[in-house]
Amino acid sequence: MKIKVSILEPLREALFFIKPRALKQFIWIIEDYPRNLPSVLIDPGQLTQVFINLLLNALQSIKDSGEVKIVVFLTPDNCVVVKIYDTGQGIKREDLAHIFDPFFTTKADGTGLGLTITKNILMQNKISISIDSAVGVGTTVTLKMKAHYEI
Ligand SMILES: Nc1ncnc2c1ncn2[C@@H]1O[C@H](COP(=O)(O)OP(=O)(O)OP(=O)(O)O)[C@@H](O)[C@H]1O
Ligand SMILES: [Mg+2]
């Protein structure tokens, strides 16, 4: 069910699950959130699933230790943006076009459904996603949604 809520709520739910795993992998999680953030109209339970999927992908891309940085900000055109940066292995240019395809995986034990499900949930919640990556440098996932203001 969609409700008016801060995007930080499902993000914090997901991090509660992700942080102990990150710690075990010696991955540092950096969070940068603004003080005053408008609400968005979303299904928070679904968004928790999205953040868990994206953050697990980030952790899995880091072979040794590394860093995952989450930055949230409001744009001048009243959109809430969430960026997730990782210092993982990155995505090959030829793979980038296929990462949202069902069953596309480069992992021995992956199902390749994480990003397919993520994209469907985001579509239902009117949130756009884009992924930039450089092999050997890392990956950046950007989510963008309209802020929800009461009239
Ligand atoms: N942050 C990332 N860094 C590097 N590669 C990524 C990242 N996110 C996604 N990918 C690539 O996209 C592919 C598809 O991701 P997706 O989450 O759909 O499936 P998966 O992670 O392989 O399996 P599952 O999510 O079902 O465990 C991954 O196998 C990987 O190659
Ligand atoms: Mg995945």
Image (spheres, grey):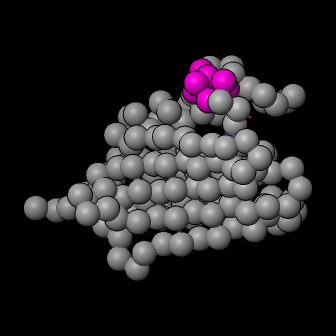
Q: Is residue 73 above or below residue 138?
A: below
Above or below, comparing residue 48 to residue 68 in the picture: above
Q: Main secondary structure of the magenta part?
A: loop
The image quarter in which residue 13 lies:
bottom right
Is residue 51 positioned above or below 93 on the image?
A: below
**Quadrant hosting residue 116:** top right
Q: Identify which residue is drawn at 31% across, 56% down.
A: 79
Q: Is residue 110 left or right of residue 15?
A: right
User: Could you say which is closer to the camera, residue 6 or residue 81?
Assistant: 81
Query: Residue 86: within the magenta?
Result: no
Residue farthest to the left, as pictured:
151
Picture residue at 42% right of the left edge, 75% below the top: 34
Residue stretch rendered in magenta on the structure: 94-101
Camera sees residue 33: yes
Q: Is residue 116 left or right of residue 20?
A: left
| Spot occupied by residue 143 in the image (x, y as percentages of width and height) | 45, 48
Query: Is residue 98 located in the magenta-colored stretch of the structure?
Result: yes
Instruction: Pick whichever, 9 or 116, lies toward us.
Output: 116
The residue positioned 85% from the left and 61% from the top of the image is 65
